[in-house]
Image (tube, helix red, strand yellow):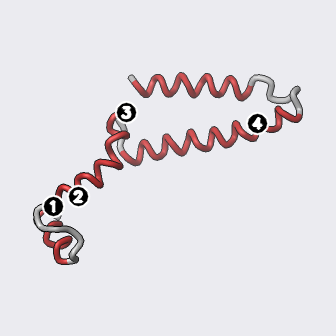
Amino acid sequence: MTSTTIEYYLHSLGLFDIGQELFYINSFVNIFTKHPGEVGESYLEHGFAALRYAFTFLLLFVIAFIHAIFPFLFERTASNCVSEMTEHMRQREK
C-alpha cells in the first residue's frame, strides 16, 4: 500500500486532515519504534526481550518472597540472577 493510498483511505474515513496524514502516521509509528531502534532491535525483538525480563522479575519476586520466610533457601539466587541481568543489559547497550 502506497502512502497515497493510505492518505486516501484515512481521508475517506475522515480520520485526518489533508496534508497531515503522513505526519500523524509517522509520529504514531515512531512512538512504538524509536526506543527499540535506539537499542538496535525491532519492535517485536524488543517486546520479547521486555517480556523475558518481566517474567524473570516475576520469578525473582517469588524466590525473594520465599527467601524472606525461609532465609536458608535461595540464599544467593536472586542476587546472582540480578547480576547476570545487569551484565546482559550492559551488553545490549553496546
**Dot 4, crowdedness within 10 Å: few (<14), some or many (≥20)?**
some
Identify the amino acid type marked 2: Tyr
Nearest to N terminus: mark 3 or mark 4: 3
**Residue 63, numbered circle:** 4
**Residue 20, numbered circle:** 1
Residue found at x 63% / y 27%: 82
Nearest to N terminus: mark 3 or mark 1: 1
> Cα distance, mark 2 to mark 4?
45 Å
Q: Quadrant of the N terminus?
A: bottom left
Residue found at x 16% / y 68%: 17
Tag in front: 3 or 1: 1
**Dot 3, crowdedness within 10 Å: few (<14), some or many (≥20)?**
few
Q: Label 2, secondary structure: give it.
A: helix
* 28 w.r.t. 1: above or below: above
The count of marks equals 4
Nearest to N terminus: mark 2 or mark 4: 2
Q: Are the residues at dot 3 and dot 2 in contact (C-beta closer than 8 Å)?
A: no
**Residue 24, numbered circle:** 2
The image quadrant of residue 20 is: bottom left
Identify the amino acid type marked 1: Gln
Q: Are the residues at dot 2 and dot 1 in contact (C-beta closer than 8 Å)?
A: yes
Q: What is the x, y in percent for residue 7? A: 15, 67
Q: What is the x, y in percent for residue 72? A: 88, 26
- Of residues 27 and 4, the one nearer the viewer is 27
Q: What is the x, y in percent for residue 94? A: 38, 22
Residue found at x 71% / y 29%: 78
Q: Label 4, secondary structure: give it.
A: helix
> Cα distance, mark 3 to mark 2?
24 Å
Please give the residue where the numbered disc 3 appears in the rendered image: 39
